[in-house]
């Protein structure tokens, strides 16, 4: 039997999965700022399940920083320290671990599997972090921090018996540079890009060589070959080049393996190609187009495969925890232990009593429960019983430029004039220190004051309310400027709530059950508002005059194949191919 055949017969694999965010926020030992954290939390059990289907016993360890708000006394400290060097100073990271137990739905039946998370702590590097701040604002500080943590991760990986390393986003993109060429000759390293708008670009401090030298990297050897980006340092560019050079694969979070659709296809489009496509849409030259690859033309040359993110099966309305009374009672009990007996999940007494007293799970054959959830949502946010036949537009998201939710605020009055029974329920907040986001919060607050009983706005996020909004609304609005994969469109669709989206990135995956508009000219804001408004009006027309068609869309949405099965199997095949290539 050849060495290649032996690799194909692999029966055991240890995977190091590196990420700045790992989700698991309910455990107090994880963070989730966006989709990255959710994906990294959900992926390991799905990978183990997919590997088992291919006859592989997969063990996954998730590596991440140990942020300042974690209670390290509740973690297990390993008898191990890993060194790092920043600005010529050598120091050591402490290493902690925690074992999480997740249920994996194997073909032969569910089983509980242990998943180890490994955390790296150094006071000097991470003392400033807390639950609301895990990313530095200063890119110079960020480069050194990402380098230090990457050195720690690489030191740990080199001491372990790992067959594959999987990096998630640029924050950990320096890991392969510290693993060393001898390691990379034996062990494949792959990179998944969750958002190419964030590339780890840092302006130079005294030149490219010295900038990298301060971050513990040999600048003269590496700067021009990997990092140079218009006389700046670009971590994502360097990581892509290093991974591809050593036989790994670069993937992103929507599309197919050939990169023919979704974010994988968008990343390959040049400014000229996007401008030409915009002209085909509008019939005139674009004032300005948003370029998803941020002018990193490496994307146009280096093959990037799409492996579309999935969602766990418990996001379906039959299994959604936030529709289960026992789960909600447990959440409330925990909330009251921390904040006292006055704490609540819902502000309306009737809504809280109803949600805590019985399950509100449903399926395509029991849409009367969704109607009841709409009634409860209306009561919770507007404080009055539902009357008439309102069309509820739910919005759940972050008030950041990417999400483009200002467009919702700007078309809302016109939608309400067009259909007096339209209603808007918006749960969204701005990041700390973001004046533009705060201005948008004020805009939504003013809108709600001008349209009482028709528009509701809240900026205090909590999961039970967000789930009630998605489950109780008729439509969800997702006008993102770009969306590498998109999760809220999936989450809403599975709950029978019809997405109205811009046709960008991964959002095109719901085109079979939603209303999509195509727009690229970001300079023509009024034109985009008209395109968005036209799809909202079309959705309302069908909702009002062709309800059987609307119900057919709901059933199609709820039947969406949003699971991890195909994607996890593709990752396992990618790992196997990487090992085969190493021989």
Image (spheres, helix red, strand yellow):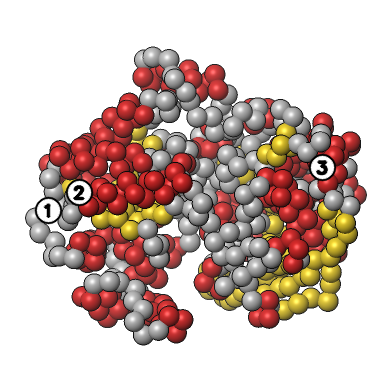
Using the rendered view, name the quadrant where residue 103 is placed.
bottom right
Question: Does 24 sit left or right of 455 as displayed?
Answer: right
Callouts 3 and 2 close, C-beta under 8 Å: no
Which residue was labeled with disc 1? 389
Real-space Cα distance between discs 1 and 2?
A: 21 Å
Using the rendered view, name the quadrant where residue 405 is placed.
top left
Real-space Cα distance between discs 3 and 2?
A: 53 Å
Instruction: Report x, y in % for residue 553.
Output: 27, 46
Real-space Cα distance between discs 1 and 3?
A: 62 Å
Q: What residue is shown at x 75% (from left), y 57% (from top)?
A: 149
Q: Residue furthest left?
A: 388
Callouts 1 and 2 close, C-beta under 8 Å: no
- The dot on residue 531 is none
Which residue was labeled with disc 3? 212
Q: In the rendered view, would you say 322 is above or below 194?
A: below
Which tag, 1 or 2, sits closer to the chain's start?
Answer: 1
Tell me the crowding category of disc 1: few under 14, some 14 to 19, or many 20 or more residues within 10 angstroms, Cα based. Answer: few
Instruction: Report x, y in % for residue 377.
Output: 24, 63
Q: How many marks?
A: 3
Which tag, 3 or 2, sits closer to the chain's start?
Answer: 3
Q: In the rendered view, would you say 74 is above or below 376?
A: below
Quick one: SS at disc 1? Answer: loop
Which residue was labeled with disc 2? 450
Q: What residue is shown at x 30% (from left), y 43% (from top)?
A: 409
Quick one: SS at disc 3? Answer: helix
Whether residue 307 is visible to the viewer of this picture, yes or no, is no
Instruction: Report x, y in % for residue 267.
Output: 57, 33
Tell me the crowding category of disc 2: few under 14, some 14 to 19, or many 20 or more residues within 10 angstroms, Cα based. Answer: few
Q: What residue is shown at x 25% (from left), y 79% (from top)?
A: 353
Which tag, 1 or 3, sits closer to the chain's start?
Answer: 3
């Amino acid at each position: 039997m050849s060495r290649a055949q032996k690799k194909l017969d692999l029966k055991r694999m240890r995977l190091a999965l590196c990420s700045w965010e790992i989700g698991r926020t309910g455990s107090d030992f994880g963070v989730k700022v966006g989709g990255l954290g959710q994906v990294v939390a959900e992926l390991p059990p799905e990978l183990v399940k997919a590997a088992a289907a291919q006859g592989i016993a997969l063990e996954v360890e998730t590596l991440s920083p140990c942020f300042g708000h974690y209670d390290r006394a509740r973690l297990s400290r390993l008898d191990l320290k890993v060194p790092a060097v920043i600005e010529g100073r050598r120091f050591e990271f402490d290493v902690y671990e925690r074992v999480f137990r997740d249920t994996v739905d194997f073909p032969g039946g569910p089983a509980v599997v242990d998943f180890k998370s490994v955390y790296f702590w150094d006071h000097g590097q991470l003392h400033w972090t807390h639950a609301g701040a895990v990313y530095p604002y200063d890119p110079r500080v960020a480069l050194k921090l990402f380098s230090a943590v990457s050195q720690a991760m690489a030191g740990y990986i080199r001491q372990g018996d790992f067959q594959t390393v999987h990096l998630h986003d640029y924050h950990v993109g320096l890991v392969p540079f510290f693993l060393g060429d001898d390691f990379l000759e034996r062990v494949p390293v792959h990179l998944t890009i969750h958002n190419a708008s964030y590339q780890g670009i840092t302006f130079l401090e005294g030149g490219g060589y010295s900038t990298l030298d301060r971050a513990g990297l040999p600048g003269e050897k590496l700067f021009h070959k990997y990092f140079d980006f218009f006389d700046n340092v670009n971590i994502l560019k360097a990581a892509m080049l290093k991974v591809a050079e050593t036989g790994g694969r670069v993937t992103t979070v929507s599309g197919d393996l050939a990169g023919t659709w979704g974010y994988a296809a968008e990343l390959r489009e040049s400014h000229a190609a996007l401008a030409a496509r915009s002209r085909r849409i509008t019939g005139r030259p674009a004032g300005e187009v948003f370029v998803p690859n941020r002018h990193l033309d490496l994307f146009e040359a280096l093959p990037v495969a799409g492996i579309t993110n999935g969602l766990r099966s418990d996001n379906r309305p039959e299994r959604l925890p936030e529709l289960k009374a026992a789960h909600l009672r447990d959440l409330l009990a925990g909330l009251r232990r921390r904040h006292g007996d006055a704490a609540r999940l819902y502000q309306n007494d009737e809504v809280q009593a109803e949600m805590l007293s019985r399950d509100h799970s449903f399926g395509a054959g029991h849409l009367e429960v969704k109607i009841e959830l709409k009634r409860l949502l209306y009561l919770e946010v507007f404080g009055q019983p539902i009357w008439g036949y309102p069309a509820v537009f739910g919005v759940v998201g972050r008030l950041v430029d990417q999400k483009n939710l200002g467009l919702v605020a700007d078309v809302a009055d016109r939608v309400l004039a067009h259909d007096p029974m339209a209603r808007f329920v918006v749960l969204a907040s701005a990041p700390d220190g973001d004046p533009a986001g705060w201005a948008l919060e004020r805009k939504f607050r003013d809108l709600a004051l001008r349209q009482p009983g028709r528009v509701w706005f809240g900026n205090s996020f909590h999961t039970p309310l967000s789930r009630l909004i998605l489950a109780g609304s008729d439509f969800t609005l997702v006008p993102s400027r770009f969306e590498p994969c998109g999760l809220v469109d999936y989450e809403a669709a599975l709950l029978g709530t019809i997405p109205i989206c811009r046709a960008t990135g991964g959002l095109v995956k719901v085109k079979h059950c939603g209303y999509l508009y195509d727009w690229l000219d970001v300079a023509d804001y009024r034109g985009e508002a008209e395109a968005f408004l036209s799809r909202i009006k079309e959705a309302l027309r069908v909702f009002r005059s062709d309800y059987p068609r609307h119900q057919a869309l709901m059933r199609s949405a709820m039947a969406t194949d949003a699971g991890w099965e195909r994607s996890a199997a593709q990752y396992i095949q990618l790992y196997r191919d990487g090992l085969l290539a190493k021989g």
